[in-house]
Amino acid sequence: MSELDERETATVTTKVPARLDRLPWSRWHWMVVIGLGTVWILDGLEVTVVGSIAGRLSEEGSGLDITDAQVTGLAAALYVAGACSGALVFGRLTDLYGRKKLFLVTLGVYLAATALTAVSFSAWWFFLFRFLTGFGIGGEYAAINSAIDELIPGKYRGRVDLIINGSFWLGAVAGALLSVLALNENIFPPSVGWRLTFALGVVLGLVILLVRRHVPESPRWMFIHGRAEEAEQLVTEIERQVEAEKGEPLPEAGESITVTQRHSIGFGLIAKTVFRSYPRRAVLGLSLFIGQAFLYNAITFGFGSILIRFFDVSSTVTGYYFAVVAVGNFFGPLFLGRLFDTWGRRPMIAGTYVLSGLLLFGTAWLFGAGMLNAVTMTACWCVVLFFASAGASSAYLTVSEIFPMETRAMAIAFFYAIGTAAGGISGPLVFSGLTSSGVVSDTVLAFCIGAALMVAAGIVAVFFAVAAEGKPLEQIATPLSARDTGGGAA
């Protein structure tokens, strides 16, 4: 009996990967980007809204008996715990049943949980549905990153993946500005405004669902899972659309690949492949996720509290400050993304991680010395996160392209879950206490923890990052189902 799966179907030779990788950029690729990539806008909206409305939720008349620390600490940790759990559950299902089925299901979970959050009548209800909202978003990470990397040509993969992941911050801008409007008591009562911010997430999600219905299954997943004929037909249709748009025939596809089809891959083999065949890549993935999770939690979950406590900024206008920081975050992947495909993965990943960590150390020193005000503090955060956002986005790109295709969604889910659990569950609990204490040295410590882990991850990337720029996925990591493979690489 095969270690891969006892339900072997056939051995097929195909040029599907080469045919997809030689496609020029087209309207079809834009449809994929819009249909799949916009989920990060929803995630950005979710995280930012909660941070921006934390002060209002804890005020009398909000309709919830909840404290500021519970919103920025417990609720944030539950959201991340849900995301980690959802990534693992849906990541496994994505590898088993396909990308398309799961990216429709996960969006449905998000929509239902967000709608129920909007009608929260007690703290426990709010906590429960923050967890379930995260559960849906976590599943999105595994399903969406898998599909994007398998549908986007290799020469564009780095910049597209970074910009898509960076679009989280477009949602953050929307959430920040929306919170300013929703928290204006001259427009909405205190118990209504914050609910409308979650309701908007539902509306955006429904729009995305309409577009996403037209995004196809990954042909790469299909030909390995016994659906080679469908994969060939799908790629032929894509080629027809692209040729019609460009008005010229496509160049010849490159090399073919021969695989033994399987319906599924055992979980044990996935774990053995990731950690035994690719140990250096596993260390790299964990380092990148832990570093970025701690840095972002050091800043974002205490953002509003820092401005209010240390700079006397009103809770009704913190959204403006966060919107400025969010724009800086989006500009990072937007302007630096191309360099990950041209200069290369190793220098750009290592450089963005180390530089953002050093800049955060500098910000901590200036803050501790009392040399910053609300505006200059926000400016410092913008500079730090310009580089950190590109680095954090590259973490998702990295783990989605450096492991064999059969393990892709599960690898994304695992590294996201472990790295984010370390920084994203413990982070809010630790940092909310530090930043809400009102003691300057505590907030400085929070910044230094995030900065140190970011620098450490960058150093790991110097030695372990993979030169994946411009390469087909099958060259970066040979599929487990491919015939005549010689095993993995470190």
Image (cartoon, helix red, strand yellow):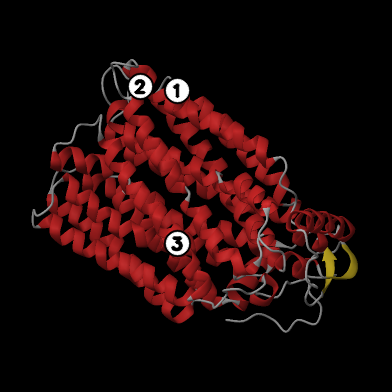
Where residue 282 sits: x, y (%)? 53, 71
Type of amino acid under label 1: Ser
Residue 150 visible somewhere in the drawing: yes
Where residue 123 sits: x, y (%)? 39, 26
Write the residue at 60% across / 46% down. 34
Which residue is outermost to the left? Answer: 370
Badge 2 density bin: few <14, some 14–19, many ≥20, Cα 10 Å: some
Of labels 3 and 2, earlier in sequence is 2
Residue 28, above or below 129: below
List the residue tagged with mark 2.
64
Q: Are marks 1 and 2 in contact (CB under 8 Å)?
A: yes
Write the residue at 57% across / 56% down. 413
Which residue is outermost to the front? Answer: 247
List the residue tagged with mark 3.
289
Badge 3 density bin: few <14, some 14–19, many ≥20, Cα 10 Å: many
What SS does tag 3 mark? helix
Write the residue at 82% across / 70% down. 15
Where residue 208 sits: x, y (%)? 61, 37
Type of amino acid under label 2: Leu
List the residue tagged with mark 1.
120
Type of amino acid under label 3: Phe
Residue 44, above or below 387: above
**Horizontal side of residue 62 vs 155, given as left or right:** left
What SS does tag 2 mark? loop
**Horizontal side of residue 249 vs 156, given as left or right:** right
Residue 410, above or below 438: below
Viewport quadrant of the N terminus: bottom right
What SS does tag 1 mark? loop
Of labels 1 and 2, earlier in sequence is 2
**Horizontal side of residue 351 vs 165, given as left or right:** left
